[in-house]
């Protein structure tokens, strides 16, 4: 019990400090795109560190190394992608809309927003922590299955990102809505695969006689909530409606919002 509570406190403190650093970078650079970059690397750093947290004075076992490696690969892939994207923009339109709404109070409100983001990320990292610390020293089939799920999520998200990047870089697509490849089946396939990857931790963490393993369910639950209801889809769709108008409304009408489904005319958004 003490180890898990201590790990939870260390995770919360680490994320709070790192997101305070993200606020400093955002304020000095004027580009809020770096917020998501730092958040991704923060989750990777704290997640891998928590996975390798010693158990009863013993060194990390195979599962701890596996989980730490998985979260590190996820963080490096996504963080690098966001960093490259951020270098090519002056500001993230989602955060810029928040700043415009907040006016002169934007710096203080942004700091509070990012601290709330740090707090909301605690369940994600804690899920990594409890999955890594299943009290069984050897790897099981479900550990391999969990690793496969996360790798599929990483690959799917990378494919979706690459398809969107190619679409945007084609001058013929200027002002159009990306509806090719995975984007024909979901309006946000990158978010879907991001969420899908977090299913790996309950697959690894749920184990008979390990009550803390239930906490690993927090990862996909919170990630779904964040992506679908908070900082993911809602502000992005609002921005797309402003910039693409009827074209995006037509896209909404035929394309599933989140889960990949066959497109058809008149489908509910």
Image: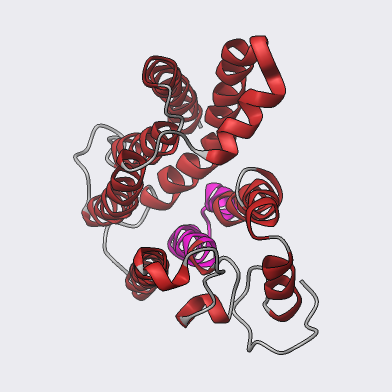
Q: In the rendered view, tell whether residue 231 sits above or below residue 119.
A: below
Residue 86 lies, in percent from the top left, at 36, 41
Question: Which quadrant of the figure has residue 93?
Answer: top right
The answer to if 201 sits in the magenta stretch is yes
| Image coordinates for residue 255, horizontal then vertical, percent | 67, 78
Looking at the picture, how far across and down is residue 1, in whole percent? 51, 32
The quadrant where residue 165 appears = bottom left
Q: Is 128 above or below relative to 265? A: above
Specify start and end residues of the magenta stretch as a single range: 191-217
Q: Residue at x 26, y 49 (%)?
A: 76
Tell which residue pokes out farthest to the left in this image: 59
When the figure is inspected, residue 26 is found, relative to residue 202, above or below; the finding is above
Nearest the viewer among 219 and 110 is 110
* Percent x, y of residue 45: 30, 36
Task: Give the answer, above or below, for where 30 lies relative to 157.
Answer: above
Asked whether 172 falls inside the magenta stretch, the response is no
Q: Give left or right: position of 178 versus 261.
A: left
Residue at 38 percent across and 67 percent down: it is: 171
Nearer to us in this view, 87 or 190? 87
Number of marks drawn: 0
Image side of residue 255 versus residue 121, left or right? right
Q: State the colouring used for the structure image.
A: secondary structure
Image quarter (top left, top right, bottom left or bottom right) of the C terminus = bottom right
Q: Image point 29% across, 56% down: which residue?
A: 70
For residue 104, what is the image quadrant?
Answer: top right
Q: What is the chief secondary structure element of the magenta stretch?
A: helix
**Near-viewer residue (28 or 170):** 170
């Amino acid at each position: 019990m003490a180890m898990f509570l201590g790990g939870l406190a260390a995770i919360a403190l680490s994320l709070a400090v790192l997101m305070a650093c993200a606020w400093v970078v955002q304020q000095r650079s004027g580009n809020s795109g770096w917020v998501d970059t730092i958040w991704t690397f923060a989750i990777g750093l704290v997640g891998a560190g928590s996975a390798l947290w010693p158990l009863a004075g013993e060194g990390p076992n195979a599962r701890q190394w596996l989980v730490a490696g998985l979260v590190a690969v996820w963080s490096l892939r996504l963080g690098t992608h966001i960093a490259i994207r951020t270098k090519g923009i002056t500001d993230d339109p989602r955060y810029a809309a928040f700043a415009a709404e907040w006016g002169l109070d934007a710096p203080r409100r942004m700091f509070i927003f990012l601290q709330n983001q740090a707090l909301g990320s605690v369940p994600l990292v804690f899920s990594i922590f409890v999955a890594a610390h299943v009290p069984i020293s050897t790897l099981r089939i479900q550990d391999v299955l969990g690793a496969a799920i996360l790798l599929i999520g990483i690959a799917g998200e990378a494919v979706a990102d690459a398809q969107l990047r190619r679409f945007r870089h084609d001058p013929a697509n200027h002002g159009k809505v990306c509806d090719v490849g995975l984007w024909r089946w979901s309006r946000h396939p990158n978010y879907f695969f991001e969420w899908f990857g977090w299913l790996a931790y309950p697959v690894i963490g749920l184990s008979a006689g390990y009550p803390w393993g239930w906490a690993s369910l927090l990862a996909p639950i919170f990630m779904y909530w964040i992506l679908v209801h908070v900082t993911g889809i809602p502000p992005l769709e609002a921005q797309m409606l402003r910039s693409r108008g009827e074209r995006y409304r037509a896209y909404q009408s035929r394309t599933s919002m989140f889960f990949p489904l066959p497109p058809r005319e008149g489908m509910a958004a």
